[in-house]
Amino acid sequence: MKQLDDILNYCNELAFDLNFTKAKEWKADAKDRMLVGYLPIYFPREITYAANGLAVGIMGAGDHKQIIKGDAYYQSYICHLPRGIIEMALDSSLAEFDGFIFPAICDCVRNLSGMFKLADKGKFQRYFDYPQNFDKLIGGVFYRQELEKFMDDAYKVNGVKVTTDKLNHAITLYNTNRKLIEDIYNIRQEFPWRLSAVETYKVLRAGLVIPVEKHNEILEDVIDLISDERGEPMDNIRVVISGSFCEQPPIGLIKSIEMAGCYIVDDDLMLGSRWIQGNVDDTTNDPIGALVNAFLTKSTFSSAVYDVGNPKGKRLVKLVKKRKADGVIFSAASFCDPALLDRPELMKDCDKAGIPHINFQFHENTGQFKVIKEQAGTFSDSIKLWA
Ligand code: SF4
């Protein structure tokens, strides 16, 4: 068995390697392989796997890269994520990628897909729309067509056909992946000191750049290691982080919240890896239908998805109760339209349920955490003293 520190160091390397070295090595190891970069939040990676590809999550440049050209491409009053990604593309960090998926989430990502097209990055650049109607015969048919368009794109790259067997096998692997991640969250719910939120984040993010089988091995090792006692319980409050589903906060920010006396017992960082709640059917003759059905009926909640009949605020309150959290920290990227538009409604639901909350905004390359640490520390103290 490996040591946890070794695993975490390895995950750290993978998670923040903006050259995607391991993914590129994987591609170079055999012919007919392809790399498909996808942006937040969610993309059904199973299909890429079945097409002999690796879906690689591109979560922005964070605070690991100086942005110069990216700033020239965008006006000042939008979030930071697209600037970092265009900078990476123009610097050839994404050179060996065969195609890119831009999940429909906001206008910034839509425009970024156009920029990739104009700059001729990859062999395809697909703006990938998701249904906002959850009727099988409307949203379901639409989503299937979107998936088929992607399969055509992928086929044109390497000529590999997605078969039922291959797709069912991929679904099995990703079902395992989600289950293992959920196991880690469940252990952390009881014993949050055994694996910090920063460590959890690195372990999950590493999975965006390596084959799912390899990530499953890492997750299994981590579960084994944190099933035994590790670390010291602290007198911390328990919080859920909401609003960081796309642009990712810098590690220093997550660490500041923890150091301010908060156990982060759930969050929407790396939400795409946890998007489908539960298993996708991996035994059917129509695995595309199974993926469609899973999206329609088992998606988690997010500001990127319309929530008719199943409001996000109620789901957030339910999550807070499930995790036995004391409060919510609304942490959104500056200028993130979806997160900031939803925030007042989510706050109202928290108020109605008597759940305390605070909020702030960040950039992926925010360098000053003092104010956030003080705010989170005061939140923690006030809950400990008066809640
Ligand atoms: S952080 Fe928000 S506004 Fe920016 S690209 Fe993501 S969803 Fe869009």
Image: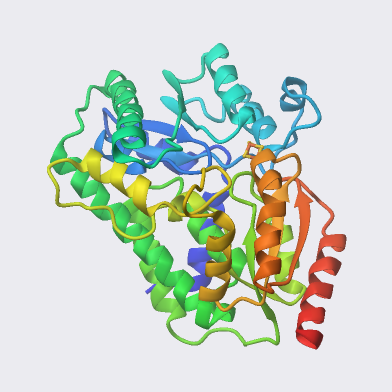
Query: Ligand 1 appears in which quadrant?
Result: top right
Residue, x 34% and y 60% (percent of image)?
278
Residue, x 45% and y 74% (percent of image)?
186
| Residue 376 rendering spot, x and y as whole percentages | 79, 69
**Left-right relation of 384 to 213:** right
| Residue 296 rendering spot, x and y as whole percentages | 36, 46
Q: 344 or 177, which is in the foreground?
A: 344
Quadrant of the image for the N terminus?
bottom left
| Residue 146 rendering spot, x and y as whole percentages | 36, 28
Q: 204 or 384, which is in the foreground?
A: 384
| Residue 119 rendering spot, x and y as whole percentages | 57, 14
Depicted 380 relative to depicted 96: above or below: below
Residue, x 59% and y 84% (percent of image)?
231
Report which quarter residue 258 is drawn in: bottom right
Q: How many discs appear?
A: 0
Depicted 71 relative to depicted 293: above or below: above
Quadrant of the image for the C terminus?
bottom right
Q: Is residue 43 visible?
A: yes
Depicted 159 relative to depicted 267: above or below: above
